[in-house]
Image (spheres, helix red, strand yellow):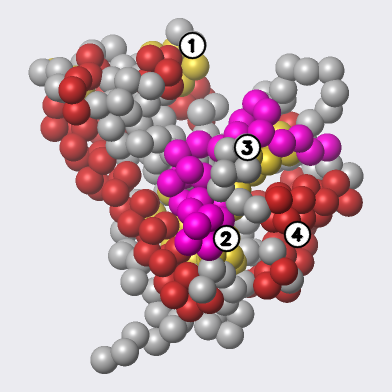
Amino acid sequence: MQKHPCTSTARPSSAVGIHLPSCRNRTPLLLSSPHSGRNYPQDFLDMTVLPMAELERMEDRFTDQLLQYAPENGWSLVQALFPRSFCDVNRDWRELDATMFSPPLLEKDLILSTKVSAGYGVIPRCTSPGKSIYRYCLPLEEAGRRLSQYWEPYHAALEETQKTLHEQFGASILLDIHSMPPLAQSRPCDIVLGNRHGKTCSSELINTVEQLFTERGYHVQRNTPYSGGYITGRYGRMDQNQQSLQVEINRACYLNMQTLQPNRHFSKLQQDITDILSQMARSHSAL
C-alpha cells in the first residue's frame, strides 16, 4: 500500500513530543526544541546532589512554549520532554565521559570533545563549572539506558519527520531552537543565528530569518559565539536540499534571570516568534 504523503512515520515515545500540522497546513518546515524538557525522572533526582533550581538553569527554559503555536502555522515540532541535565541530545551519542561510569567505558569507542572534557557530554557531568551533578560514578548500564530510551527516540523523531517532509515537498528546513545567557559583550544581542559558517543553510534562509527578527526590533548576530551544534550539523545536508539553522534566544528577552520564570516580555516574544514562523510558512517556497 502506498504511504499517504501526509503520513508521519515518527515513532511515538513518552520521552519526545511530536506535534504535526494538519495535512492541509503542512509545509517543509521543522522545529527542534532539544533542551526545553522539564520532566525530571525520579531515579535521576535520586542520583543528583544538586537542588532542582540548579538543574533548571541548564534548561533552555520554556522555549517549547515560545513555539507552541507553530503547528497551527504549518511547522512540525519535535521537542525533548526530559531535561538537558539528564541527557543532551545536541551531542553525538559517543560524546561520553568514560570516567563517569563504573566500570569505565572503553575510550576507543568514544569522542573526547572539548564539551566532554568540560563536563557537558551527551550525559552531562556538570551543570556549570564546579557544579557536579553526581557524587558517585553511575552504573555502566545507565549510559545505554539513557541513549536507547531518550537520545535515540529524539533523533528517530527528527530524522523520520525530516524524511517525511522531504519526500512530500522535495526539500526541508529545520530550525533548532535554543536559549542563551546574556552575552558578555558591549553591543546588545538578542538572537544568534548559526549555520556552521554557511555549511548548513543558504544565505537566503539566514538572511530572511535575520531580517524577520530585525524588523521586530531584535539585535541579531551570526555564528558568534554559537555557530550551530550537533543537530544543526547532522540535519543540514544542503546537497540533499535539507537545510538547518540554529537559533539562540537571549533568555533575558523573556525570563526573569533570578527566578527563571516568564517576565513581562514573554508574551510579546511568543507573538513575534509566532508571526515570524507564520510568515516563513507562507513564503517557504522562496527560502
Q: Mark 4 or mark 3, which is nearer to you?
A: 3
Point out the tag, 3 or 1, that comes first from the N-terminus: 1
On the rendered image, what quadrant is the N terminus found in? bottom left
Q: Which amino acid is tagged 3?
A: His
Q: Which amino acid is tagged 4?
A: Ile
Res. 276 mark: 4
Q: Which residue is mark 2?
A: 173
User: Where in the figure is residue 163, as x and y percent of width and height?
Assistant: 41, 67
Residue at x-position 85% and y-position 46%:
214
Res. 129 mark: 1
Image-based side of 157 in relation to 62, left or right: left
Does residue 225 show up magenta in the picture?
yes
Point out the tag, 2 or 3, that comes first from the N-terminus: 2
Q: How would you rate the neighbour count of disc 1 (Cα within 10 Å): few for under 14, some for 14-19, many for 20 or more?
A: few
Q: Mark 4 or mark 1, which is nearer to you?
A: 4
Q: Mark 3 or mark 1, which is nearer to you?
A: 3
Q: Secondary structure at mark 2?
A: strand
| Residue 81 visible in rendering | yes
Q: Which residue is mark 3?
A: 197
User: Where in the figure is residue 160, as x and y percent of width and height?
Assistant: 37, 64
Q: Which amino acid is tagged 2?
A: Ile
Q: Is residue 204 above or below residue 222?
A: below
Q: Are marks 1 and 2 in contact (CB under 8 Å)?
A: no
Residue at x-position 50% and y-position 36%:
229
Res. 165 mark: none
The magenta segment: 219-244
Alpha-carbon span between mark 2 and mark 4 = 14 Å
Q: How would you rate the neighbour count of disc 4 (Cα within 10 Å): few for under 14, some for 14-19, many for 20 or more?
A: some
Q: Secondary structure at mark 4?
A: helix
Image-based side of 199 in relation to 283, left or right: left
